[in-house]
Amino acid sequence: MSETAREIARETAQEAPTVDLGLSWKAAFQTLGPAFFTLLRPTPLPEPYWVGHSEPAARALGLPPDWRTDAALAAFTGNAAIAGTQALATVYSGHQFGVWAGQLGDGRAILLGQTAGGQEVQLKGAGRTPYSRMGDGRAVLRSSIREFLCSEAMHALGVPTTRALCVTGSPQPVRRESLESAAVVTRFAPSFIRFGHFEHFAAAGRDDELRQLADFVIERFYPECRSDTRLGGNAYANFLRAVSERTADMVAHWQALGFCHGVMNTDNMSILGLTIDYGPFQFLDGFNPAHICNHSDSSGRYAFNQQPNVAYWNLFCLGQALMPLIGDEAQARAALGAYPERFAPAFEARMRAKLGLVDAQPGDAALADGLLRLLATEQTDWSIFWRRFAHWRAGAALAPVRELFIDATAFDAWLLSFDARAAQDGAAPEAALAANPAYVLRNHLAQTAIEQSQRGDHSGVQTLLALLQTPYQEQPGRQAFADFPPDWASTLEISCSS
Ligand SMILES: Nc1ncnc2c1ncn2[C@@H]1O[C@H](COP(=O)(O)OP(=O)(O)OP(=O)(O)O)[C@@H](O)[C@H]1O
Ligand SMILES: [Mg+2]
């Protein structure tokens, strides 16, 4: 036993009680065998309390209506084991900020198990694992609230994402730049497997495990790749193609919503094309295409307008890792070609929806591009512009849209060409309202709820969650949540510290 393993064993030594939450479980990731994970228990936290909970997530997971019991509080803080589960941490590697980082792994996320309904349930911030390196295995309340809210917000926006059931907190101090307190996010997804899991075994030349992992993912999530006759009928090439397509769809959706992920390392890229790891993310305020949301990203590698290229770069890393299975470089390249082929039309379709158009026409990309240039020149507020525009399309006055521009003449000129184009379209007037949310999780909204929570009042988290769960519907009395950010929002520095 290594010294780290011994220390972890000491931390988790006390016998955790076992509780039954009324969920059925079935072994999944575990069946891969010990090369892929380490069995271990979460490390308990003292005096746990509820911070936030998502009822739609609870229903999706199959929990009963009165699920928030003391037993659930203990289980979702890592203080009790759940009957029928065997917790584990998985090993992965990855490229971070463009550089090979070697072995990483679940350093603070612990997989509890997979429900019979096919959802893997993880605790993030549940204590050290053999993959924690220098980390403490913990997550702070601040970042846990952000992850919880954004997971559920993205789901409600229709973006493929990992989901979050709840956040629980503990007074246990956690040191970051200052002393903060610990929290745990319970999140779930059909799989938390990342590009980095494949890179891990490929880098070590462990082709047997690489194949085992690919077969595991293909069998469960991409079975159609086995019978696909494209790419010479090569199942692994078709798998790479399918992942490329899902990734393109996901990133096109991000770009349409003005969502900056902030840490698109290959260990944060889901093999299912889900948005994963909500760290220094940000929904754009003013539209600056080169916006960098992560204060730790000094070179702007993950700037908003770099995201589509970075995803492609990350897919190349995945392609490289899968090469021993694909075997043919031309097929791998062709598989990766699916990304640009898919991204451009996917983004164009998203822009069309935002504009309230349905029928694809040849000049659409140029029309959208013309508008994006105007928005960039004036750094117009992304979400407010689109929501007001959607209301105008649905029959409201134009003035609230027009007044967003200092130079309204340029916008008027664009509008002339838009009007001509819209006249030939069959879209329902209110269509754009379903593509342009009224509420997104802007940094300052999250920050306000976090500070309130840090003072012991968690009601702000639930209030915000309720709005984010119905983002396309204005709620009476909640205008402030859809409004321009306050001046202090621009001074918020969100970094990798979490
Ligand atoms: N406080 C911590 N303690 C231990 N390991 C950590 C800690 N913070 C990050 N890590 C590990 O560092 C690596 C990169 O971290 P990154 O910020 O991408 O992930 P994360 O936020 O911990 O989690 P995830 O990607 O699971 O949402 C991962 O292996 C992660 O587990
Ligand atoms: Mg991560």
Image: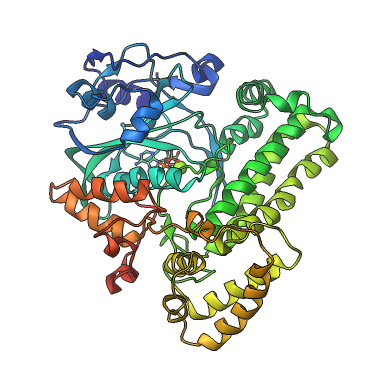
Q: Quadrant of residue 187?
A: top left
How many discs appear?
0
Residue lying farthest top?
A: 84
* Residue at 35% over, 16% down: 23
- Residue 324 visible in this rendered orientation of the protein: no
Quadrant assignment for the N terminus: top left
| Residue 174 screen position, x and y as percent | 23, 43
Q: Is residue 488 above or below residue 49?
A: below
| Residue 329 screen position, x and y as percent | 82, 39
Residue 403 vs residue 255, the one in the foreground: 403
Residue 136 vs residue 255, the one in the foreground: 255
| Residue 351 screen position, x and y as percent | 60, 61
Left or right of residue 352: residue 121: left
* Residue at 22% over, 27% down: 68
- Residue 248 visible in this rendered orientation of the protein: yes
| Residue 249 screen position, x and y as percent | 62, 47
| Quarter of image, ligand 1 | top left
Q: Is residue 41 above or below residue 458?
A: above
